[in-house]
Image: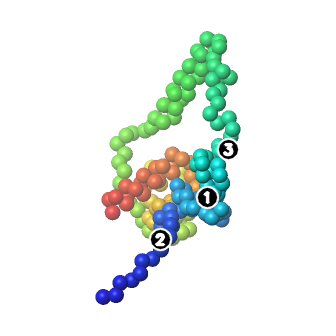
Amino acid sequence: MATQPLRKYELAPPKNLAPLHTTSDLGYPDFYPTNPGQDEDQMTEHNVRNGFTNLPFVSTEHVSARNMLSIRDPKNLKNLSDFMTDIMKRKREINTLKGSSSYTVTVPQTVWDTQSRDRWISQLASNVPLRTLAKTVPKGVEGINLLDVVTTHKVPLAKATWFTKIVGINLRTA
């Protein structure tokens, strides 16, 4: 039995990891392969004696802004507290669901052609209620394709989250 020689290991990103940008060479998120000519590869006397230290992009990165931002007038603290309370109240009002809570999530997914799917996603991006769109959901939009479709059609975040959850539920039940 002949043994094959060992192959040299080549560092490559995971197959399911999409690049940061489609046209620029920005690389992949959380994947940092070595490139020839990097600063940490330079064998200078300082690097050999002290080790490589990566300088921060901003020289005042660790300087405190406490003195500039400190609240000297007690009225300002009250105003800030009232402002934050008002924000929390508005957020609670916006995030409250209006309507009956007896609605269940059982969404049939159907296979559509690209034109019908794009029309449905355009309706998702517009003011069409989710209850109307939930009657049928296009099948085959998942993974990176799901993110691309949602961002290119400029779907609002709440509706994009809903669509992602529906796709995930249907993938788990399939």
Q: Closer to the camera: disc 1 or disc 2?
A: 1
- Distance in Å between CA atoms under marks 3 and 2: 33 Å
Query: What residue does disc 1 label?
Result: 41
Among the two numbered marks 1 and 3 on one chain, the one whose residue lies closer to the N terminus: 1
Spot occupied by residue 67 in the image (x, y as percentages of width and height) = 66, 21
Q: Which mark is residue 57?
A: 3
The amino acid type of the residue labelled 3 equals Phe
Residues at marks 1 and 3 touching, judged by CB atoms closer than 8 Å: no
Residue found farthest to the left: 1
Image check: 166 left or right of 13? left
The amino acid type of the residue labelled 2 equals Tyr
Residue found farthest to the bottom: 1
Spot occupied by residue 166 in the image (x, y as percentages of width and height) = 41, 54
Image check: 130 left or right of 103? right
Spot occupied by residue 44 in the image (x, y as percentages of width and height) = 66, 54
- Distance in Å between CA atoms under marks 1 and 3: 19 Å
Query: In this view of the protein, can residue 29 be seen by the observer?
Result: yes
Give the residue drawn at x 39%, y 39%. 100
- Label 3: how many Cα within 10 Å (few below 14, some 14–19, many 20+): few
Its colouring scheme is rainbow
Q: The C terminus lies in which quarter of the figure?
A: bottom left
Among the two numbered marks 1 and 2 on one chain, the one whose residue lies closer to the N terminus: 2
Tag 2, which secondary structure?
loop
Spot occupied by residue 54 in the image (x, y as percentages of width and height) = 62, 47
Among the two numbered marks 3 and 2 on one chain, the one whose residue lies closer to the N terminus: 2
- Label 1: how many Cα within 10 Å (few below 14, some 14–19, many 20+): few
The amino acid type of the residue labelled 1 equals Asp
Query: What residue does disc 2 label?
Result: 9
Give the residue drawn at x 65%, y 26%. 65
Q: Closer to the camera: disc 1 or disc 3?
A: 1
Q: The N terminus lies in which quarter of the figure?
A: bottom left
